[in-house]
Image (tube, rainbow, N blue to C red):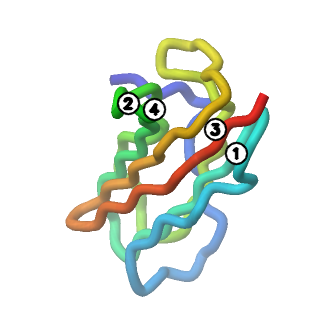
């Protein structure tokens, strides 16, 4: 799977975190873009996906390996198929190693 380069995460802190974390996106609600922040205490594979209220995957924002650190990924509210998503409630699911976390994401247009 190829992840669009507009979704590539960038490191925001050089300190190595003590634990895995997936923060609430900001801003939330959002239009047109939002930022997801996650922290990794070790080098690890990361998967960050967005699902609609029916549980259907609308976007894969990250699916790659990152070095230990804290990262931000900006998302423009566009699906993996290249279409803007509609207003509504979505869920961002972050998975890395044995850690998993889901956050509610609200799109307002």
Callout 3–callout 2 Cβ contact below 8 Å? no
Is 1 or 78 nearer to us in this picture?
78
Q: Which residue is mark 3?
A: 75
Callout 4–callout 2 Cβ contact below 8 Å? yes
Please report whichever mark, 3 or 2, sits nearer to the chain's N-terminal start. Answer: 2
Q: Residue at x 36, y 44 (%)?
A: 64
The relative height of residue 77 versus residue 91 in the rendered view (above or below) is above
Quick one: label 2, few (<14), some, or many (20+) residues within 10 Å? few
Callout 1–callout 3 Cβ contact below 8 Å? yes
Q: Which residue is mark 2?
A: 54
Residue 59 position, x and y percent, is 46, 29
Q: Residue at x 55, y 66 (%)?
A: 23
For the residues marked 2 and 1, what is the alpha-carbon distance in whole angstroms?
21 Å
Q: Where on the picture, by quarter, is residue 40?
A: bottom left
Query: Residue 10, can we see it?
Result: no
Quick one: label 4, few (<14), some, or many (20+) residues within 10 Å? some
* Element under disc 1: strand
Q: Which residue is mark 4?
A: 52
Disc ID at residue 18: none
Callout 3–callout 4 Cβ contact below 8 Å? no
Q: Which residue is mark 1?
A: 34
Residue 69 position, x and y percent, is 50, 70
Q: Residue at x 31, y 61 (%)?
A: 100
């Amino acid at each position: 799977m190829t992840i669009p380069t507009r979704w590539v995460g960038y490191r925001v802190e050089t300190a190595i975190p003590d634990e895995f974390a997936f923060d609430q996106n900001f801003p939330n609600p959002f239009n047109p873009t939002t930022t997801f922040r996650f922290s990794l205490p070790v080098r690890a594979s990361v998967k960050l996906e967005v699902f609609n209220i029916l549980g259907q995957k609308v976007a894969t924002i990250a699916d790659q390996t990152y070095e230990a650190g804290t990262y931000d990924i900006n998302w423009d509210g566009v699906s993996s198929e290249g279409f803007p998503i509609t207003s509504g409630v979505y869920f961002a699911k972050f998975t890395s190693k044995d850690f998993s976390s889901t956050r509610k994401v609200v799109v307002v247009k």
